[in-house]
Image (cartoon, grey):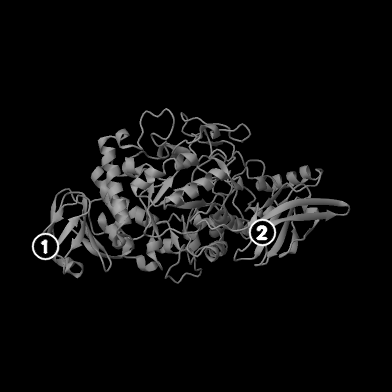
Amino acid sequence: MKHRFFSRSLYKGLTLLGIFLISLTSQAQKKASITRVDPTNWWVGMKNQDLQLLVYGPNAGTYNYSITYPGVALVKAHKVENPNYAFLDLTIDAATKPGTFTITGQNGNQKLTRKYELKARDQEPKGQGVTSADFIYLVLPDRFANGDPKNDKFKDMADPNADRKNPFLRHGGDIQGIQNHLNYFEELGVTALWLNPVIENNQPLTDEGGAMRSAYHGYAFTDHYQVDKRFGGNEAYTKLVKAAHAKGMKVVQDAVYNHVGINHWFIKDMPSKDWVHQFPTYTNTSHKFQAIIDPHGSKADWAVMMNGWFVPHMPDLNQNNPFVANYLIQHALWTVENFGVDAWRIDTYMYNDDEFMNRCNQALMDQYPNIHIFGESWVNNVLAQSRFTRNNINFPFKSNQPGTLDFVLWTAMNDALNQNFGWDEGVSKVHQVLAQDIAYQDPMKLVTFLDNHDMNRYFSVIGEDLNKYKMGLTWMLTTRGIPSLYYGTEILMKNFKDPSDAEVRRDFPGGFAGDKENKFTATGRNERENDAFNFVKKLANYRKNTPALHSGKLMQFVPQEGTYVYFRYNNDNTVIVATNSTDKEVDLKTERFAERMTGFSSARNVLTDQNVSSLSIIKIPAKTALMLELQK
């Protein structure tokens, strides 16, 4: 999620400290009860036997608690500033049987009770991870397809509106709509679905530049344990994950730890003043990542970068508060176990507390050893990017995050498509970025992309040039890392963020009732769109079935005169990707690539299936990335 400007009216005149004090007063006279317990349930047989329950309700924190159940021990009950909360530390013995126990609170003659379920773990796949063998497809649920019009809007929600004619309101896309198109993803060669957040965003409309906008994007959580019912709720998400798994696809969860929505139930009645970061007056983050890695930097700059709020209606969580940290970590584990998701994309990664992120990452990896975690750290150089993943640099802090989104390569690829060749320009930029992969412990775990929900659309950025389009996609799908495609890129969806993000988040044509065109089918796409779709389809499916291309070694050669050549290879196959970024056809002499081409006498053009009988000189048309499978 990138920085955006929003009105600060929600914050003016009343800080969260004031809200906190008012909440204490209003709750004091209510009859004591337990209205919720988070996590909503747990499982026996988890590797970590510790569990911290958040118990909430009017004056619930004024009671003394006990639990009687074989194998479950209440180690400690914590009280906090707000008497409506209690935090219960439990241990669950490895031999504990599934079942339901009673949480009992006693205060003199008054008693509170609440049932709590320990489930048996099922055998469904979960935490499978994504690897460089995968091809991720990023979907913005509200804008993709409406599979169930009955859940478009609800009167009991803070934002009850849905109107496709308004680019800033919800449009009605949902999880069922995504599930209805699993065959489409399969045809395209997709192996993993990444959904922008599906967790409840029961947010009021916010004023951005004079227009009222909804939280259809999903990054302002209001209840961690509920999938938004406008997307179909928990049941729909569970069904989607199972249906995707049945087709051999994985699901990537979009996680947000740094902030929540202003309407989150625990923000309305905070457990303590330090539940969120607060300043004497509203303080926005600076978005200056240099403050984190700068050996000469000031503590003041660090504090503003790390603890300032993203926007006024998204309070910044204080992960140094141990109860906040435990809440977020347990929710992450609960999500994987409950829904069976396979990988974890983390929003605004670099804004989170370092120690907290390492602890959270480790908890997930301990429980699910194959899970992949990759965060969003929008930086502009390799050194900074490596700081937020496992790296080979002597930083004072060592991150344990396995991967990261590769913003630096994204910049380089887009520049390469829009700049003339030069010493440091054009395709030289791609070569130079990859030449610095030594910074990462495993660059194959980085997620590559050409655009996403926060960016100008790829096809627009390259001037709607289909030759450039194919070059960039060839690089993304053949270089190292895990490629990720933004929904609609395969059918040439376009637009710039100006005047708003909504322009790059338009509805997928054919996903909604009444659409005049259905781009999910070949007959609904025009000739140019089918050309683009079939290009992605052929390349992605070839990649899926060619280990050398997705998991083999990478060797690149210094670009010369606008050409850029690299190889993907293993013991079984060698593929050459030769790019001509100029406006004229070139005859590429291959003698300087002998290191990788010796012993090969011919090749097959992967995209045209034509045979190439001689390899001494390769003809490359203008603005083309040629891909040849070498043969002996």
Label number found at residue 616:
1
Q: Is residue 281 left or right of residue 1?
A: right
Q: Is residue 498 visible?
A: no
Disc 1 marks which amino acid?
Ser
Above or below, 564 relative to 451: below
Report if residue 369 is visible in the image.
yes
Q: Toward the viewer: 266 or 110? A: 110
**Residue at left offset 46%, top offset 54%:** 376
Q: Position of residue 248 (x, y in %)?
A: 42, 53
Q: Position of residue 444 (x, y in %)?
A: 37, 63
Residues 81 and 44: in front is 44
At label 1, counting other C-alpha atoms closer than 10 Å, the crowd grade (few under 14, some 14-19, many 20 or more) is: some
- Where is residue 57 drawn, in percent x and y? 75, 48
The CA distance from mark 1 to mark 2 is 68 Å
Q: Left or right: where does residue 368 sit relative to residue 100?
A: left
Q: How many marks?
A: 2
Which image quadrant: the C terminus? bottom left
> Which residue corresponds to the image point at 46% horizontal and 43% vertical from the top-left?
179
Sequence-first disc among 1 and 2: 2
Q: Most extreme residue toward the right, as rendered?
A: 109
Q: Which mark is residue 304?
A: none
Horizontal relation, residue 494 to residue 158: left or right: left
Query: Considering depth in this image, is 414 or 100 the residue closer to the camera?
Result: 100
On the picture, is 428 further left or further right than 370?
left
| SS for dot 1 | loop
| Contact (Cβ within 8 Å) of mark 1 with mark 2 | no
Q: Nearer the viewer, mark 1 or mark 2?
A: 2
Q: Secondary structure at mark 2?
A: loop
Q: Is the residue 108 above or below the residue 569 in the image?
A: above
| Tag 2: amino acid | Pro
- Mark linked to residue 98: 2
